[in-house]
Image: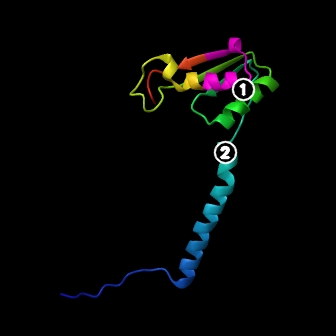
Amino acid sequence: MVTRKERWGLSRRGWLIMASLVLLSLVLVLFNVYPFLAVTHRVDTDILVVEGWIHEYAIRAGAEEFTSGPYHRVFTTGGPVVGNGGYVNDYQTSACIGAELLRRAGIPSESLLMVPSHEMG
């Protein structure tokens, strides 16, 4: 009913080294992941694309980018607004909401173009 088996295990020094390696790996990942994920490579263009679902402060930042940059057009994108039961028309999409917020932020209507999606992705 009872058997005795030998097993290999880590000593205190082994656990300390293992914990140090895990901690060092986590620190390296945390300090190096932001520059990897937040890379911005600007391209010479006269078109700015703004997602319609982003927060209003980001919409204002998009409007500032438009006025300070060499842009002639702003495209707003987005799908149906959550809670409306799916796509009804282009005016119940995040693209339309983003365009209206950009208009309120001072972007001229002739520079705004909506690119609505009919499905949520």
Q: Residue at the location (54% across, 26% down)?
A: 94
> Could you say whether the residue bearing mark 2 is in a helix, strand or loop?
helix
Q: Residue at the location (67% across, 45% down)?
A: 36
Which residue is label 2 attached to? Answer: 36
> Could you say whether the residue bearing mark 1 is in a helix, strand or loop?
loop
Sort mark 1 into few (<14), some (14-19) or many (20+) by Cα contacts within 10 Å: some
Dividing the picture into quadrants, the one containing residue 78 is top right
Q: Amino acid at mark 1?
A: Ala
Q: Amino acid at mark 2?
A: Phe
Q: Is residue 2 left or right of residue 112?
A: left
Q: Position of residue 43 (x, y in %)?
A: 74, 25
Look at the magenta stretch and give its main secondary structure: helix
Extreme residue in the front direction:
104
Which residue is label 1 attached to? Answer: 105
Q: Which residues make up the magenta segment?
A: 98-113
Q: Position of residue 11 (x, y in %)?
A: 51, 83
Q: In the figure, 61 relative to 17: above or below?
A: above
Q: Are marks 2 and 1 in contact (CB under 8 Å)?
A: no
Q: Residue at the location (42% across, 80% down)?
A: 8
User: Which mark sits nearer the N-terminus, 2 or 1?
Assistant: 2
Nearer to us of marks 2 and 1 is: 1
